[in-house]
Image (tube, rainbow, N blue to C red):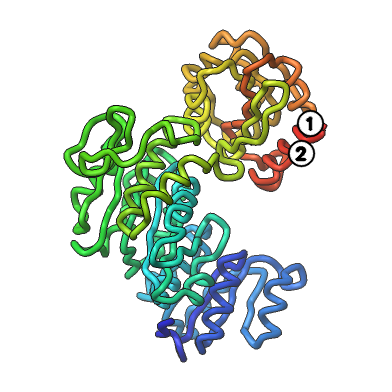
Amino acid sequence: MKNQYTGKKILVLGLAKSGEAAARLLFRLGAIVTINDSKPYEENSQAQQLEQLGIKVICGHHPLELLEEGFEIVVKNPGIPYSNPIVRGALKKGISVVTEVELASAISAAEFVAITGSNGKTTTTTLIYEMLINSLRKPLIAGNIGTVACEVAEQATVQNVIVLEVSSFQLLGTEKFKPKVSVFLNLFDAHLDYHGTKEEYKNAKAKITVNQTIEDYLVYNADDKAVSKVAESSHATLIPFSTKRELTRGLDLKNGFINFNGQPLVQLDSVVLPGRHNLENILAAIGAALTMGAQVNQIEYVLKTFSGVEHRLQFVKEFQGRRFYNDSKATNILASQKALEAFKEPTILLAGGLDRGNEFDELAPSLTNVKALVTFGQTKEKLARVAKEAGVETILFADQMEEAVNLAFSQSRLDDVILLSPACASWDQYKTFEERGKRFVEAIERLTV
């Protein structure tokens, strides 16, 4: 592990999981750490525990006078916007403002495979990790997928490779981050409340490749114009992938095979993960995994056995000829469109959640195979209107997840798909999309005992 932080004065802005991990790491590395978190001290168990270690904590507000204390670096929680007064003040003073991904990059002895995009990051990250098992270097997994990057990097050696899911929020706070392999999946309108414009959002995502050189690799979606534009300005060796056309180099689909540089690699029949969008994720994963030394037989094994990440078009079980899928991570319309397009079978859709003020008319063309909608949450009336106009035969309302699952099953027949893909955030009824998905799975278990 490399250490460039000993003796440096560093402000950690915002705790949560990544902030606490960053503070503990920097303290262990000998930095002079101060923590500033908006949650009041008496309610802030994280801050209390960190203070017991000897770390200075300031809670309940963000005093601008903090910036007079001579900090060299501010490590901010990715969710804190750049409009925050402390962040703005630090940048004005020329203080470096980074996220913990930059810390991970600075201390890691292992190389990184970094994955970003508007959709599909977690699935692709997991696929790459699984494909790299039994290769020359042991893979470690980190990032938005659940394990904080700097914690993983602290333990990593040159015998490891870190497979890292990174968001635009995290990438925006990087300066020297330089993955050996970057993966850029797609770019859609998202997080514009944070970034302001799609151009700024794209520029944040593009930081995944900005420091790469010809000795590094960028695996990118050649079917996405915005992503391809980023690839044009990259200095990395390019590995494109496409599900729509043949490529002379990179990854594509032809004659029932996944091909790499024009040569058949793996039969498409090997793939058990549903959905055309998942073929994009699979091609990206194969490109990254092969570049980092994955074995073809391990790739084939993963494709034959990997049926989805939890809450992301996850196959739950089959019961009386009906197949249940948990896609609670579908917190926007685009994600639900892709989930619905994954199935040709008659589908009972469970959808609804937090009302962000948008309508759902864009979902209508994807409702072709939906025979029934069970809707809930703040958006239920909006979803019901769109479903009715799209010709969905049956529209039912539910208050709780168990009721929704029971209603969906009552409308199903042999060979039908019952799909939770809400097209909305969960916060009107659940703390997280994970909790929502868990309630769905629990309701299925109670129904099928």
The answer to whether mark 1 and mark 2 are in CB contact below 8 A is: yes
Q: Amino acid at mark 2?
A: Glu
Residue 442, numbered circle: 2
Q: Residue at x 63, y 28 (%)?
A: 351
Q: Is residue 266 left or right of residue 99?
A: left
**Front in this rendered view, residue 440 or 297:** 297
Above or below — where is 128 with respect to 16? above
Q: Where does residue 144 sit, x and y in percent of width and height? A: 52, 56
Task: Say few, some or many: other residues with alpha carbon within 10 Å of mark 2 (under 14 / 14 to 19 / 20 or more).
Answer: some
Which image quadrant: the C terminus? top right
Which image quadrant: the N terminus? bottom left
Secondary structure type for disc 1:
helix
Q: Is residue 56 left or right of residue 220?
A: right
Tell me how far mark 1 sits from mark 2, CA to CA.
8 Å
Q: Is residue 395 left or right of residue 203?
A: right
Above or below — where is 257 with respect to 13? above
Q: Amino acid at mark 1?
A: Glu
Q: Label 1, on which residue?
A: 402
